């Protein structure tokens, strides 16, 4: 048999993302996926090796092997090719990507020692070498980055990591109980976080210097039934017969309605208005719509999804009359984005049907990022990359031209943009932990930090501010100098007061109100409401009226915002379209200026390499908004005639407070830190308030949880500065301020793994029954009680989808680069339950 056809029990990553987004706060286990009815074809050679995979859309991949039946090449339908060079032991010592003309576009290599351990990771350019050494027991001992900065690990007699010393000689210590469970983490300033467990390894108590003591209780099935936080607020959880959460943290969850067996079908949350979200699915189990009820003016407030044969999103309808459509090329990559506006008369008496291209002629590097595309207003964006697939330039004629320079570990060191307001090159410097220390970007910025990543001082053009902290925690207390402020916190570690301004949070750490004291009386400046998924759905500013928001539950991106009047404001609505995670266009509707609703003006985004908007142009190509963005994300608008509130990826500027809404938390760009401690604790970094380990020019945090590289949203972890390889476009070798903590969690969970002798798990589990098999069906999927596993064309793991559990109370995904499971996993829920 040379060809077989499967009906695969296989989810698409976006559907996994959906379930995570919906169930994160509820601590639920994802249901088994429905069998799809699409057909994927597999062709084998005489030895049984897979030589061709054809997807339902017709896109295909060819596979080539050497004489030992080891995979050496993967070729797509466009003729692009990945080539692996193998040593005698089968290690991939070199990875290259070639285009259809056989021109190399990507190059990465590795050196292994005699025991098959990675000794060096080598980038595409001279000097880009990260080195690793090991002790006699095979434990990772040192990591030396391409700037010769070394991180060192220590172990006890049981090979448990007991200490990590970073390149600044600051040491973090770890301690364990007799059952090898982590019981304490002590940072370089002697701030200690402790953990206590019951006999079944359930976490009973966590005591943090930042968030106080939180205790937990469980039922006989191991479900968490209560959480008592440091404010002594008790949250209780109830479950149905299938151990699915039905009530908790002020949310009600319903399942199996309207024939959608095994699916979450609607969620209700209280908070001012009762908000409901209703979900529908198709026969393949894919989400088809999310409808909001319980808010004012929600007569057509829904999001609808459609898919192509390969399960990729082909359409997102933002209302009955507005659709964003996505086209794909033969390799399955996005090739076009268009807007379809229409009205059949209905209650408005307006009839129109308009299709507007938003992006066309989209081309990609082979197996890589976008290279060029044309905006709907005729402007063309071009990007350049080096052979690390690291962006070295981005240009839109007459709008922006930016050339990027990097140091050997991948830190951005310079930007040249002759169209910038200053016209001068911008330069950046870093300390041995890759924390930003200096920036010459219009203004001259300087920053210093302590051993755990707290900012000690900042200066702008020599105007200096000094920061002081609570001795027993990482809580900022005062600013003195050019900026002056004092901070007070609630017991959960959330900022409660800044001078005459107070902040109110829910039991699950969501900011609900900002109140200012004016003439001795409290005045509510801003209040927020959230839905059952944890997204902000309504904002009440002090000017009156209110603003409603709709987020994409698949990605967390903002899709719609609508302002319903207020002082100085009329009704307006904005719809957002995205291209591979970056803002692409905003479609405006303002009833005061356009009562006929047509044509709706479009503004196109021109972003930096991280996806942060720098400028927008209108349909005629004229500049409609521009801003100077400082290193930590504060925007100074320099020109334009529209208001534009998107900032760092995942952040939305609130003009009422000057803060950025970042889904899980609120970010203050003046401080480079969050108002709230990280909901995922130390899994987000040793400093639970700092933004992306103080490296905002190289990392993003779209959900307010975990630093990630802009390329593929890869979380800082073993892939950055440690085996098995550097993340494409990422910084190689991150200090303890961020990377070292992640790398510890990787080590800890590897050591506590029992996954068929393969690379270990991030997640403490109760036996091997929680894991799917290591080897599985080619391009297939296997579901375990606590984890699903997706397999590549060779039947090896490429991605794990983990459900919430003790040790990680939020859904998350683990990649398997080069056959090694990455750690930690990256959250794929916007708001995890703490």
Image (cartoon, rainbow, N blue to C red):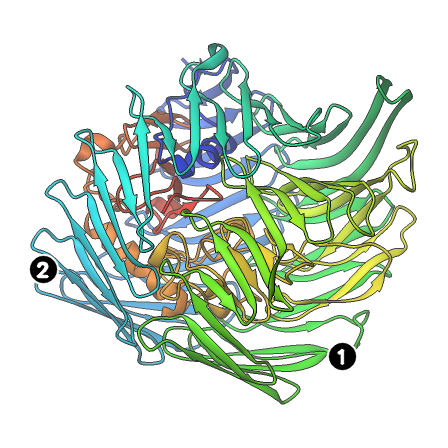
**Where in the figure is residue 384, as x and y percent of width and height?**
68, 58
Q: Residue at x 46, y 28 (%)?
A: 51
**Where in the figure is residue 331, as x and y percent of width and height?**
62, 34
Query: Which quadrant of the figure contains the N terminus?
Result: top left
Q: Residue at x 62, y 53 (%)?
A: 526
**Kind of element beneath mark 1:** loop
Residue 319 is drawn in which quadrant?
Answer: top right
Q: Residue at x 80, y 73 (%)?
A: 421
Disc ID at residue 562: none
Task: Please give left or right for residue 765 compared with residue 485 in the image.
Answer: left
Residue indicated by mark 2: 158
In the current view of this chain or complex, which residue is farthest to the top? 259
Closest to the observer, 690 or 798? 690
Vertical order, 798 against 213 (above or below):
above
Q: Residue at x 44, y 69 (%)?
A: 488
Please report contact status of discs 1 and 2: CB closer than 8 Å, yes or no: no
Alpha-carbon distance for marks 1 and 2?
A: 56 Å
**Where in the figure is residue 4, as x and y percent of width and height?**
44, 14
Vertical order, 328 against 565 (above or below):
above
**Kind of element beneath mark 2:** loop
Whether residue 212 is visible, yes or no, is yes
Vertical order, 23 against 90 (above or below):
above
Task: Please give left or right for residue 550 compared with residue 250 in the image.
Answer: right
Whether residue 141 is visible, yes or no, is no
- Density class for disc 1 (Cα within 10 Å; few <14, some 14-19, many ≥20) is some
Task: Please give left or right for residue 218 compared with residue 265 in the image.
Answer: left
Residue indicated by mark 1: 424
Closest to the observer, 68 or 816? 816
Closest to the observer, 722 or 697? 697
- Density class for disc 2 (Cα within 10 Å; few <14, some 14-19, many ≥20) is few
């Amino acid at each position: 048999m040379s060809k077989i056809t499967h009906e695969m029990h296989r989810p698409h990553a976006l559907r996994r993302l959906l379930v995570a987004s919906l169930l994160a706060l509820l601590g639920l286990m994802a249901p088994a996926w429905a069998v799809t009815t699409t057909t994927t074809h597999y062709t084998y050679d005489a030895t049984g090796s897979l030589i061709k995979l054809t997807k339902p859309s017709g896109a295909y991949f060819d596979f080539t092997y050497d004489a030992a039946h080891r995979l050496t090449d993967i070729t797509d339908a466009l003729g692009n090719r990945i080539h692996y060079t193998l040593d005698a032991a089968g290690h991939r010592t070199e990875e290259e990507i070639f285009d259809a003309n056989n021109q190399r576009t990507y190059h990465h290599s590795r050196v292994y020692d005699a025991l098959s351990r990675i000794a060096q990771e080598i980038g595409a350019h001279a000097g880009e070498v990260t080195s690793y050494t090991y002790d006699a027991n095979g434990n990772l001992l040192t990591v030396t980055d391409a700037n010769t900065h070394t991180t060192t690990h220590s172990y006890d007699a049981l090979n448990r990591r007991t200490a990590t010393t970073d390149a600044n000689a600051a040491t973090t210590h770890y301690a364990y109980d007799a059952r090898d469970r982590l019981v304490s983490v002590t940072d370089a300033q002697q701030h200690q976080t402790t953990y206590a467990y019951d006999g079944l390894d359930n976490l009973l108590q966590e005591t943090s210097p930042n968030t106080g003591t939180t205790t937990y209780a469980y039922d006989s099935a191991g479900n968490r039934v209560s959480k008592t936080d440091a404010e002594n607020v008790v949250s209780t959880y109830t479950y149905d017969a299938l151990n699915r959460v039905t009530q908790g943290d002020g949310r009600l969850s319903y399942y199996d309605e309207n024939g959608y067996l095994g699916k979450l079908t609607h969620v209700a949350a209280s908070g001012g208005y009762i908000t409901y979200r209703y979900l529908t699915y198709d026969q393949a189990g894919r989400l088809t719509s999310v409808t909001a009820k319980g808010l004012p003016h929600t007569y057509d407030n829904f999001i609808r999804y459609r898919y192509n044969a390969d399960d990729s999103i082909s359409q997102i309808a933002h209302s009955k009359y507005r659709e964003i459509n996505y086209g794909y090329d033969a390799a399955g990559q996005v090739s076009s984005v268009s807007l379809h506006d229409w009205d059949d008369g209905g209650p408005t008496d307006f009839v129109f049907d308009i299709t507007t291209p938003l992006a066309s002629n989209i081309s990609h590097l082979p197996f890589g990022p976008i290279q060029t595309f044309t905006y709907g207003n005729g402007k063309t964006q071009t990007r350049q990359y080096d052979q690390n697939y690291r962006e070295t330039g981005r240009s839109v004629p007459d709008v922006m031209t930016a050339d990027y320079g990097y140091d050997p570990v991948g830190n951005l060191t310079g930007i040249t943009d002759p169209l910038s307001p200053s016209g001068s090159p911008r330069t950046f410097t870093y300390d041995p932990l890759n924390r930003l220390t200096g920036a010459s970007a219009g203004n001259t910025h300087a920053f210093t930090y302590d051993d755990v990543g707290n900012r000690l001082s900042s200066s702008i053009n020599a105007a200096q501010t000094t920061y002081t902290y609570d001795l027993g925690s990482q809580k900022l207390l005062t600013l003195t100098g050019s900026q002056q402020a004092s901070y007070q916190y609630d017991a959960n570690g959330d900022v409660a007061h800044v001078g005459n301004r107070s902040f109110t949070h829910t039991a699950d750490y969501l900011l609900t109100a900002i109140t200012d004291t004016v003439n001795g009386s409290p005045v509510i400046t801003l209040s927020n409401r959230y839905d059952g998924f944890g997204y902000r759905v309504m904002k009440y500013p002090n000017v009156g009226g209110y603003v409603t928001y709709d987020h994409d539950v698949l990605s967390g991106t903002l899709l719609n915002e609508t302002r319903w009047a207020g002082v100085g404001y009329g009704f307006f609505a904005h719809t957002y379209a995205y291209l591979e995670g970056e803002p692409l266009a905003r479609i405006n509707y303002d009833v005061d200026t356009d009562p006929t609703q047509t044509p709706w003006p479009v503004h196109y985004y021109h972003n930096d390499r991280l996806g942060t908007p720098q400028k927008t142009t209108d349909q005629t190509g004229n500049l409609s908004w521009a801003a100077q963005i400082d290193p930590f994300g504060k925007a100074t608008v320099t020109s334009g005639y529209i208001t534009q509130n998107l900032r760092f990826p995942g952040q939305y500027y609130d003009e009422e407070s000057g803060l950025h809404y970042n889904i899980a938390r609120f970010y203050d760009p003046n401080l480079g830190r969050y108002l709230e401690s990280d909901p995922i604790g130390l899994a987000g970094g040793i400093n639970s308030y700092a933004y992306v380990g103080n490296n905002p020019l190289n990392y993003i945090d779209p959900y307010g949880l975990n630093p990630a590289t802009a390329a593929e949203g890869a979380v800082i972890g073993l892939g950055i500065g440690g085996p098995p390889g550097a993340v494409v476009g990422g910084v190689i070798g991150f200090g303890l301020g961020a990377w070292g903590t992640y790398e510890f969690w990787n080590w800890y969970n590897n050591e506590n793994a029992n996954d068929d002798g393969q690379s270990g798990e991030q997640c403490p589990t109760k036996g091997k029954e929680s894991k799917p098999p290591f080897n599985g069906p080619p391009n297939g999927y296997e579901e375990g009680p606590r984890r699903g596993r997706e397999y590549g064309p060779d039947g090896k793991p490429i991605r794990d989808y983990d459900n919430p559990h003790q040790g990680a109370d939020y859904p998350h995904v683990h990649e398997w680069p080069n056959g090694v499971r990455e750690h930690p996993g990256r959250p794929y829920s916007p708001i995890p339950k703490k």
